[in-house]
Amino acid sequence: MASAWREITASGFLWLILLFHPLARVLANMEGDALHSLRTNLNDPNNVLQSWDPTLVNPCTWFHVTCNNDNSVIRVDLGNAALSGTLVPQLGQLKNLQYLELYSNNISGQIPSDLGNLTSLVSLDLYLNNFTGPIPDTLGKLTKLRFLRLNNNSLSGQIPISLTNITALQVLDLSNNNLSGEVPSNGSFSLFTPISFSNNPSLCGPGTSKPCPGAPPFSPPPPFVPQTAPPSPGKSGDDPTHTNGDGLE
């Protein structure tokens, strides 16, 4: 009886391994396909993506890619790599991605709305590129995002109000773009100073030095005037805290 039970238990474990191992391979292959789609869409003069071989079982051995213990991609580091071209919507398939670092390249085109599917994302660094078009409203779904740096591009349109719902956001830089409209001031945006929005000539509102049309002009705060202490009772030069020998003032 015990021997039969051991055989059943062993068979059960083997069945679980056979079940989940193909699923892990499917996930890894899907993420590898997504990253290879990015590679084929980018010009890579320095061959930094040379190791991105789609015939491998998963992308975890590729340079500039980091995986977790389940062989799922959690980080892509391609900053300052002289890359050009455009991003691909397949990036939205990297469900466990936490860091997408593509700063200081020559990547152009629009930011794919599919990046809003990267709900594990902690850092999105696309600054110092040539991105155009609007900031996708879908980025407001990235509730774990702590760092959002899109500065020094050519982004246009209004700042999506959905971004104010990212309560985890600690660092925001949208400066040096062509954004327009009123800067949101509610939610997480109440924490950010005008430097986060600087050099966007068509932005207006409290986060800038420019009032929006129809809004009352900004008025400077009244000058600070220190209050003068009221004159002490009694003779000039008396110490108001001095008490007599009876403990009475």
Image (cartoon, rainbow, N blue to C red):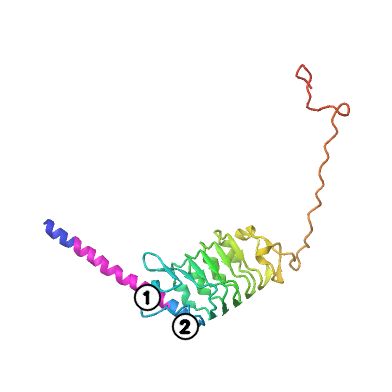
Residue 109 visible in the shown view: no
Q: Which of 162 and 50 lies nearest the eye of the viewer?
A: 50
- The residue at the far left in this view is 1
* Residue drawn at point x = 45 percent, y = 80 percent: 37
Q: In this image, 241 relative to 16: left or right? A: right
Pointer 1: what residue?
29
Q: CA distance from mark 1 to mark 2?
A: 16 Å
Tell me the quarter of the image containing the C terminus: top right
Secondary structure at numbered mark 1: helix
Residue receiving disc 2: 40
Q: Residue 190's x, y, as percent?
A: 64, 58
Q: Kindly identify the residue that appears in the image at 39 percent across and 80 percent down.
A: 54
125 and 224: which is toward the camera: 125
What secondary structure do most residues of the magenta stretch adopt? Answer: helix
Of tags 1 and 2, the one toward the viewer is 2
- Where residue 204 appears, as percent x and y from the top left, is 71, 67
Q: Is residue 49 above or below residue 67?
A: below
Q: Residue furthest front?
A: 46
Q: Would you say 25 lies left or right of 126 here?
A: left
Q: Which residues are magenta?
A: 9-33
